[in-house]
Amino acid sequence: MDEIVDHVTTAYLALVDEALPERIEGLYLVGSVALADFHPDRSDIGFVAVTADRLGDDDLDALEDGHDRLADQVRRPWFSGVYVTWDGLASDPRALDDVPAHHEGRFRRTGGFDANPVQWLTLRTHPMAVRGTDEPEVWTEPDAVRDWTLANLDTYWEPWVARQRKLVRGTMMLSDWAVGWGVLGVPRLHYTLATGKVASKTEAGEYALSTFEDRWAAIVGEALRLRRGEGKQAENYRRRPLVRRREALDFMSHVIAYAKTRFTTV
């Protein structure tokens, strides 16, 4: 386990155990940590915390305070995740109500996005226990993973790409962070649709290089370079940020359109 991940999880458990003794029975790491693709300067620490019973208002107050105190100790990387019961973990997450979550420094009492079929699949296939059984009972269902992934492409990623094509909002795609996040993020979903498995961002980039046409190799290679923190920018993008932005968005649109055509069932 990375040193900063160990430090953050140890500090977190000390704080929540003080505030809510014996309530957090399971703590599992997901995302880049579980998929062996964690980079301290570019990754979040994703978690799923498990309790025996649903948390009440007083419990949530204590958790929110605990996360605030943790942020005072460690500002980055973000410690983001959801709170569910063991029964919730063993059931379809789309049917769960009132899922508390902490996301990028903000505590939310409901609507935890990371309680979803792909996250459950990650936990089922790559369990990384900090506390609790090493093999928790986790619900998975291939059709649910496919349906949720297609919906995510349709309702989140496709509108996101459309917004980035506009002059004002599209300035985000001039940043290294957005190029790496988008160009590797969309192929991750394509990989899940094609294989029924989950991939890290780095694995998704390697998959994209072997799956899509050679014309996309430059922008995928650039995203992988950013992810790995490697070397100098490719000559074709040096001092040409608008070219990089356009190719990133075009690639993402291509992958989304192909996935929706290839994997949508009639």
Image: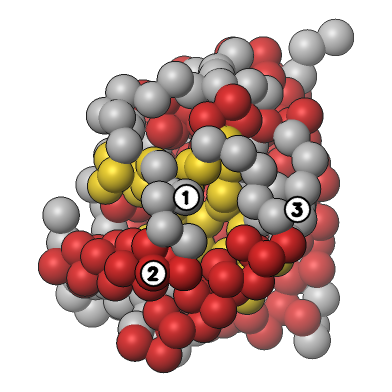
Under mark 1, the amino acid is Arg
Residue with the mark numbered 3: 111
| Residue for point 20% across, 63% down | 6
Horizontal and vertical percent for residue 56? 70, 55
Q: Which residue is mark 2?
A: 18
Under circle 1, the secondary element is: loop
Which residue is found at the position 55% from the left and 79% from the top? 65
Tell me where residue 257 sits by quadrant: top right
Q: Which element type, helix, strand or loop, lies under badge 3?
A: loop
Mark with earlier residue (2, 1): 2
**Other-residue count near label 2 (Cα within 10 Å), few / some / many at <14 / 14–19 / ≥20:** few
Q: Nearer the viewer, mark 3 or mark 1?
A: 1
Give left or right: position of 99 versus 16: right
Residue 48 appears at what percent x and percent y?
Answer: 47, 46
Question: Is residue 250 placed above or below 116 in the rendered structure?
Answer: below
Mark 2 secondary-structure assignment: helix
196, 6: nearer the viewer: 6
| Sooner in the amino-acid sequence: mark 3 or mark 1 | 1
In-front residue for pair 144/47: 47
- Point out the residue furthest to the right here: 266
- Rendered location of residue 41, percent (x, y): 31, 76
Q: Earlier in the sequence, mark 3 or mark 2?
A: 2
Looking at the rendered image, the quarter that the N terminus falls into is bottom left
Is residue 64 in view?
yes
Determine contact: label 3, label 1, CB under 8 Å. Answer: no
Identify the residue position indicated by label 1 in the image: 23
The mark lying in front, picked from 3 and 2, is 2
User: Distance of mark 2 from mark 1, alpha carbons?
Assistant: 10 Å
| Residue found at x 59% / y 26% | 87
Q: Label 3, label 2: how many angstroms apart (C-alpha)?
A: 26 Å
Q: Is residue 254 visible?
A: no
Q: How many numbered marks appear? A: 3
